[in-house]
Image: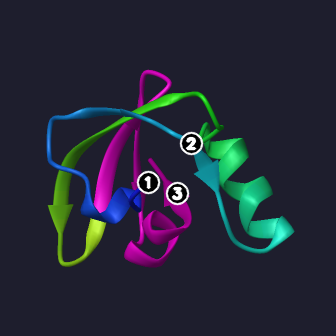
């Protein structure tokens, strides 16, 4: 398992685990990041990550991307 922050651009990955505080987990879950779901990195800019999750593009910070394990 590696954090989403280190995923290759364009590669589809399966989310294995979401870490962090309960409110952080809930926030990511509301954005569509759930264990067993797929996520692919579209771009990385200045440490921030733009991902495609559940047919939507979402921008998350590097800190949030570190909490999502693939």
The disc, 1 or 2, on the residue closer to the chain's N-terminal end is 1
**Considering depth in this image, is 64 or 8 the residue closer to the camera?**
8
Residue 16 badge: 2
Element under label 3?
Answer: strand
Q: Position of residue 23 (x, y in %)?
A: 82, 67
Q: CA distance from mark 1 to mark 2?
A: 8 Å
Residue 1 badge: 1
Q: Which of the image's four quarters has the N terminus? A: bottom left
**Considering depth in this image, is 48 or 10 the residue closer to the camera?**
10
Q: Position of residue 37 (x, y in %)?
A: 55, 28
Q: Are marks 1 and 2 in contact (CB under 8 Å)?
A: yes
Q: Which residues are drawn in magenta?
A: 49-70
Residue 68 badge: 3
User: Is the residue 37 above or below the residue 51 in the image?
Assistant: above
**6 with respect to 52 (left or right):** left
User: Is the residue 4 above or below the residue 58 in the image?
Assistant: below
**11 with respect to 18 (left or right):** left
């Amino acid at each position: 398992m590696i954090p989403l922050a280190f995923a290759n651009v364009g590669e589809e990955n399966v989310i294995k685990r979401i870490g962090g505080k309960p409110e952080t987990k809930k926030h990511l879950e509301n954005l569509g990041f759930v264990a067993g779901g797929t996520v692919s990195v579209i771009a990385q800019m200045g440490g921030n990550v733009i991902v495609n999750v559940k047919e939507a593009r979402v921008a998350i910070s590097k800190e949030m991307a570190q909490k999502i394990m693939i």
